[in-house]
Image (cartoon, rainbow, N blue to C red):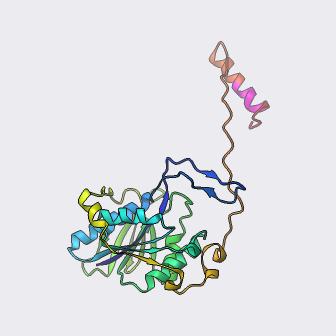
Amino acid sequence: MEIICCLKQVPDTEAEIRPAAGNGEINYEGVKFVVNVYDEYAVEEALKIKEKLGAGTVTIVTLGPERAAESIRTGLAMGADKAVHLDDPAFLGGDSYVTAKALAKAIEGMNYELIFCGMRAIDDDSMQVGHILAEFLGLPSVMGIVKFELSDDKKKATVHRQVEGGTEVLEVPLPAVLGATKGLNEPRYPSLPGIMKAKKKELKPLKLADVGLSEGEVGKQGAMTKVTAFSLPPLRQAGKIVEGDTPEAKAAAVAKLLREEAKVI
């Protein structure tokens, strides 16, 4: 089975993120980057399907700067077979719409029976790229899946996703775009042999001209939304310790503070 996994490189969750001068963009100097955790679930599920069937290929597709190749190699070390890297400055700075458009153009010319991606990216948390990608490719999409079952004829899949109050079970014709989330599996760690093999696996770079798009259709120029400014959340003020000789006195003091200072009652 031919499976594509869309993978994004994101800042480490423990990294300190701050706006750059002017607040127009993020200052990534000194920031550690990792594979988006939800995309790890996607890669793992693709590898499990391939291993169960005993045949097929898993191809990683990434849009990002040159440094994103490091995260692509992580996916290859996990066991993916090859990768495509949309590596051109023109692609950068765009929103979910133009990112999905570029990914779709790259994927159009590839063989695939299933596309996995992460349900969301932990940096912008937009949860839009998977659905928009499916729309460009004319495919059904389901995000947030926690269980995947492939039919015997490989023409459809049954997927489970958690919804408020229960679990939704959907039957989806293939090919489709499916967004992985926590609970679907436990991603494997790249082994040392896998890391060594990843260095020799195909990592094909694609430039803007290779996907048949113009500069006005991608990146900042083609984006449908614009970020006007970034700012840090306000510092949390120090808390107050309420004094009182009895629980009743303390409760009265709290009520007074809520009414006169916080003005919430």
Q: Residue furthest top?
A: 245
Q: Compared with residue 238, is residue 44 higher up or lower down, i.e. above or below?
A: below
Residue 109, position as x, y percentages in the image = 42, 86
Q: Residue at x 24, y 78 (%)?
A: 152
Residue 229 in the figure: left or right of residue 93: right
Dominant SS of magenta comes to helix
Residue 117, position as x, y percentages in the image = 43, 68
Q: Residue at x 29, y 61 (%)?
A: 195
Quarter that holds the N terminus: bottom left
Which residues, given as a range, are shown in magenta?
A: 254-259
Residue 109 in the figure: left or right of residue 79: right
Q: Nearer the viewer, residue 189 or 175?
A: 189
Q: Residue furthest right?
A: 260
Residue 80, position as x, y percentages in the image = 31, 69
Assess whether residue 35 is covered by the magenta stretch.
Answer: no
Q: Nearer the viewer, residue 184 or 12?
A: 12
Q: Residue at x 60, y 71 (%)?
A: 94
Residue 256, position as x, y percentages in the image = 75, 26
Q: Compared with residue 77, is residue 157 higher up or lower down, i.e. above or below?
A: below
